[in-house]
Structure formats: C-alpha cells, structure tokens
C-alpha cells in the first residue's frame, strides 16, 4: 500500500460490519423485551435461528453497500440516494422473506406500502449519510497548517 493509493476495504468486511451491527442492535432490543417474552411463554428455542437470520440480513445489506460504494463518485447525491434505496428495499424484502412471507402474496397491499416507505426512507437517509461521509472525507483531505 502506497500513500497515493489507499487500500480498498474488501466486500466481506462490509458484510461482517453490517451483520455484527444489526445482530448486536437486535440482541439489545431482545434483551430489553426478554421479560415480556418470558411472561408470554414464547418459544425461546427459535432465538438462535432469528439471530442467524438477522445476521444474514445485515451481512447481505453490507455486501450490497460494498458493491455500490463507487456509485456516489459517479452520480453524486443521486448515487447516495440509489445506494440507500436499494439497501432499504433489500432489507425490507429480506424481512418479508425471513419473517412474514404473507407480505409477498398477491392479496397483501401492505407490501406496497412497506416498499414505498423503504424507498422514501432509503433515499433520504442515503443522501443524508452520504453527505456526512463526503464532508468528513473532505475535512480529512484539507491540508493542516499554513
């Protein structure tokens, strides 16, 4: 690695970061809800499978972000919006596939609403996070001192 050519982070690193972060946040929420789960006598034997599914969702979304990471350099704000929209829609699709497949039937209008919400939210958050990332990168590249 030379100074003029920064190292490129591998795709699986993005996947691992996404999987670990989503699993950690979900585990925190599950611990918070544990008294309620125990009171309802929910089957706790399903928790490892849920954790695996959540990790897979984060891993796949992280990998998608890795694949699309050069898009904002070409398209600017529109690239950030596309990355956000695609990631959120993939996340919602995986939620439906893993946890409630009835959303994907022909007579369930809730899926249209969910994908619409994912599209709007992903576009806004993609631009917002992308702009923060761009500003941070620009501040790191400014020469220090006079």
Image (spheres, rainbow, N blue to C red):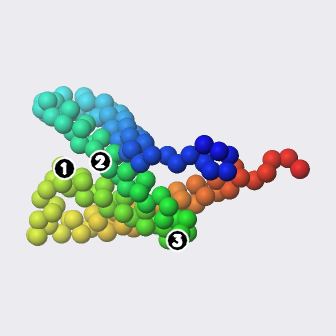
40 on left or right of 94: left
Name the residue that disc number 3 marks: 75
| Residue at (45, 46) in percent of width and height | 10
Picture layout, residue 109 above or below residue 138:
below
Looking at the image, is mark 1 or mark 3 earlier in the sequence?
3
Question: Which callout, 1 or 3, points to the residue nearer the camera?
Answer: 3
Name the residue that disc number 2 marks: 57
| Residue 144 tag number | none
Mark pair 1, 3: CA separation = 33 Å
Q: Tell me how many marks there are.
A: 3
Looking at the image, is mark 1 or mark 2 earlier in the sequence?
2
| Residue at (68, 56) in percent of width and height | 138
Q: Secondary structure at mark 3?
A: helix
Looking at the image, the residue that sits furthest to the front is 2
Mark pair 1, 2: CA separation = 9 Å
Mark pair 3, 2: CA separation = 26 Å
Question: Which callout, 3 or 2, points to the residue nearer the camera?
Answer: 3
144 on left or right of 27: right
Looking at the image, is mark 3 or mark 2 earlier in the sequence?
2
| Residue at (67, 51) in percent of width and height | 4
- How busy is the neighbourhood of tag 2: few (under 14 within 10 Å), some, or many (20 plus)? many
Q: Secondary structure at mark 2?
A: helix
Name the residue that disc number 1 marks: 98
- How far across and down, in percent of the image, does residue 15 sit? 38, 45
């Amino acid at each position: 690695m030379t100074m003029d050519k920064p190292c490129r982070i591998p795709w699986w690193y993005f996947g691992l970061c996404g999987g670990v972060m989503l699993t950690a946040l979900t585990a925190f929420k599950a611990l918070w809800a544990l008294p309620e789960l125990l009171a309802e006598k929910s089957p706790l034997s399903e928790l490892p499978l849920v954790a695996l599914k959540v990790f897979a969702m984060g891993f796949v979304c992280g990998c998608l972000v890795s694949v699309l990471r050069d898009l904002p350099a070409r398209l600017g704000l529109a690239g950030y919006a596309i990355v956000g929209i695609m990631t959120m829609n993939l996340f919602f699709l995986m939620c439906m596939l893993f946890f409630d497949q009835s959303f994907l039937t022909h007579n369930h209008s809730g899926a249209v609403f969910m994908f619409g919400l994912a599209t709007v939210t992903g576009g806004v958050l993609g631009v917002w996070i992308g702009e923060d990332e761009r500003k941070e990168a620009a501040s790191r590249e400014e020469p220090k001192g006079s």
